[in-house]
Amino acid sequence: MNRRYETTLPGLYAIGDAAAKIYTGVSGAGAAGLIFCAVSGNRAARFACEYAKKVNYLSISERQLETLREQALAPLMRKEGVDPAHVILSI
């Protein structure tokens, strides 16, 4: 990730914990983490908008879009399985 919060994958930006807080010197939990999350989110959004204005869009069919939507939302629709909080506590 660079100072524009761009990752090595064009069009993908990292903010908050995913950004590793390497440019602000912020570390740890609590208010400092929230501040970094807000700042990095704001800055990454601005740079992502600049990127989006320059890139050519690919067409996608409604069927592809619906499939992607279902896949993205599938974890939210699960009725059973491992609770994410349990995974975090285990780690």
Image (cartoon, grey):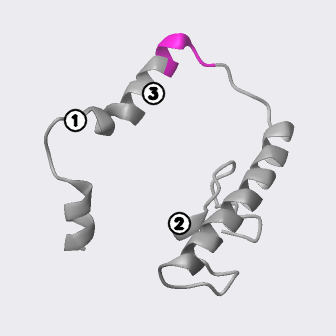
Q: Is residue 85 left or right of residue 61?
A: left
Magenta region? 60-65
Residue 53 x, y percent position in the rendering: 85, 38
Secondary element under disc 1, as helix, strand or loop, is loop
Does the residue at mark 2 contact the one at mark 1 (Cβ under 8 Å)? no
Q: Which residue lies most toward the top here?
A: 62
How much space separates mark 1 and mark 3, taking CA atoms? Answer: 16 Å
How much space separates mark 2 and mark 3, taking CA atoms? Answer: 23 Å
Q: Within 10 Å of the Cα at label 2, are there few (<14), some (14-19), or many (20+) other Cα atoms? A: few
What residue would you read off at disc 1?
Answer: 78
Does the residue at mark 2 contact the one at mark 3 (Cβ under 8 Å)? no
* Mark whose residue sits in front, 2 or 3: 2
Q: Is residue 78 left or right of residue 30?
A: left
Residue toward you, 39 or 19:
39
The amino acid beneath tag 1 is Arg
* Mark whose residue sits in front, 1 or 3: 1
How much space separates mark 2 and mark 1, taking CA atoms? Answer: 25 Å
Point 60% across, 19% down: residue? 60
Residue 59 x, y percent position in the rendering: 67, 19
The answer to whether 24 is drawn above or below residue 53 in the figure is: below
Q: Within 10 Å of the Cα at label 3, are there few (<14), some (14-19), or many (20+) other Cα atoms? A: few
Q: Is residue 83 left or right of residue 49?
A: left
Residue 23 x, y percent position in the rendering: 70, 81
Point 22% across, 35% down: residue? 78
Q: Which mark is residue 68?
A: 3
Residue 63 lies within the magenta run: yes
What residue would you read off at disc 2?
Answer: 18
Q: Which mark is residue 67?
A: none
The amino acid beneath tag 2 is Ala
Identify the main secondary structure in magenta: helix
